[in-house]
Image (cartoon, grey):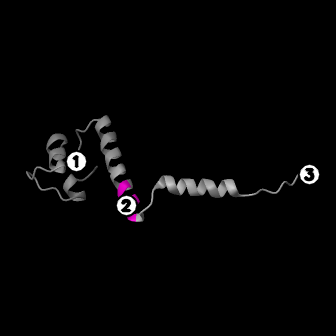
Amino acid sequence: MNKPLGYYCAVTPGDGSYLDWLQDTYGSQLEGIPRLEKLHLLQAITVNLLNAQIATEGRYIKEIRRRQHSKIASMTFINIYP
């Protein structure tokens, strides 16, 4: 990250938020964050975005996959070799 955390999102120093804690603990550019915690943070952000998308669409990914699988399974293929 080339810019401080406050460039990407609203961080108010001293407000006690998670972002404030991240900045205090790992620096304003998160330069001190270990690899495992980077991966954990990335996973948490991804899960949050996925849940927001699911809530917005009002359906579950498993249901979409089930429907796609059903469509593929119901297709009939022509045997071109007698």
Q: Secondary structure at mark 1?
A: loop
Circle nearer the N terminus (1, 2) = 1
Q: Position of residue 36 (x, y in %)?
A: 32, 35
Seen from the viewer's position, the closer of residues 59 and 31 is 59
Seen from the viewer's position, the closer of residues 33 and 44 is 44
Circle 3 sits on which residue? 82
Q: Residue at x 34, y 40 (%)?
A: 39
- Mark 1 is surrounded, within 10 Å at the Cα level, by few (under 14), some (14 to 19) or many (20 or more) other residues, namely some
Q: Position of residue 46 (x, y in %)?
A: 36, 50
Circle 1 sits on which residue? 29
- Mark 2 is surrounded, within 10 Å at the Cα level, by few (under 14), some (14 to 19) or many (20 or more) other residues, namely few
Seen from the viewer's position, the closer of residues 62 and 45 is 62
Circle nearer the N terminus (2, 3) = 2
Q: Which residues are magenta?
A: 51-56
- Res 33 → quadrant: top left
C-alpha separation, residue under disc 1 versus residue under disc 3: 66 Å
Circle nearer the N terminus (1, 3) = 1
Identity of the amino acid at label 1? Gln
Q: Secondary structure at mark 3?
A: loop
Q: Residue at x 15, y 45 (%)?
A: 21
Identity of the amino acid at label 2? Ala
Residue 75 is one of the magenta-drawn residues: no
In the displayed structure image, the side of residue 8 where residue 50 appears, left or right = right
